[in-house]
Image (cartoon, rainbow, N blue to C red):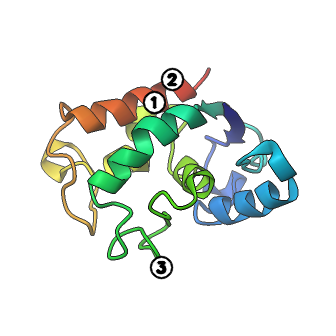
Amino acid sequence: MRTWRRSGAGAKDAPPLWLLPVLALLVGWGAGCEGPQAPQAPGGGRELALDYAVFVDAIEPILQERGCSASACHGNQGSGELLLTGGLNPEADFTAVGGHVTPWEASASPLLRKPLAQAAGGDVHGGGDVFLDTSDADYRTLLQWLSAGSTP
């Protein structure tokens, strides 16, 4: 498991979300064999300990099968603040996804709310509706992974 902190107090207490994956990659490269790391946000916050093995085995395949890592979406040049390699670099994808998690409330994470249909409570997403509602099996898998990684 990889652990980092994100502040829940507001954007002024933490770096912008788009900056976290970049910083994490830089920190990860300097850390040698320790795997993907993300910087600790100023001010602390709730600990996030997402399971990397589950990401590789269950989450990355969902992102690929649903087209999220396609070059027209979040792959290659990327779209929005999420840049995915499509499985070419799972550690980078893991770090990038970690920047789209709300540790204090997994279901409020942009990783879940953006692809969820607005009619089901999701946010506006340029890529359209990936999940029609919260009963979708892949949505539930993502939610379970995020919930397991969020600790009080």
C-alpha distance separating marks 3 and 1 = 26 Å
C-alpha distance separating marks 2 and 3 = 30 Å
Q: Which residue is mark 2?
A: 148
- Most foreground residue, 96 or 103: 96
Q: Which residue is mark 1?
A: 145
**Image position, residue 72 (x, y; %):** 32, 76
**Image position, residue 97 (x, y; %):** 52, 51
| Label 1: few (<14), some (14–19) or many (≥20) C-alpha neighbours in 10 Å | some
Q: Amino acid at mark 1?
A: Trp
C-alpha distance separating marks 2 and 1 = 5 Å
Of labels 2 and 3, the one closer to you: 3
- CB contact under 8 Å: marks 2 and 3: no
Mark toward the start of the polypeptide (2 vs 3): 3
Determine the residue positioned at 62% across, 20% down: 152
Quarter holding residue 149: top right
* Label 3: which secondary element: loop
- Most foreground residue, 146 or 28: 28
* Label 1: which secondary element: helix
- Position of residue 32 relative to residue 83, above or below, is above
**Image position, residue 30 (x, y; %):** 87, 59
* Label 2: which secondary element: helix
Q: Amino acid at mark 3?
A: Gln
| Label 3: few (<14), some (14–19) or many (≥20) C-alpha neighbours in 10 Å | some
Instruction: Say left or right for 111 vs 103.
Output: left
- CB contact under 8 Å: marks 3 and 1: no
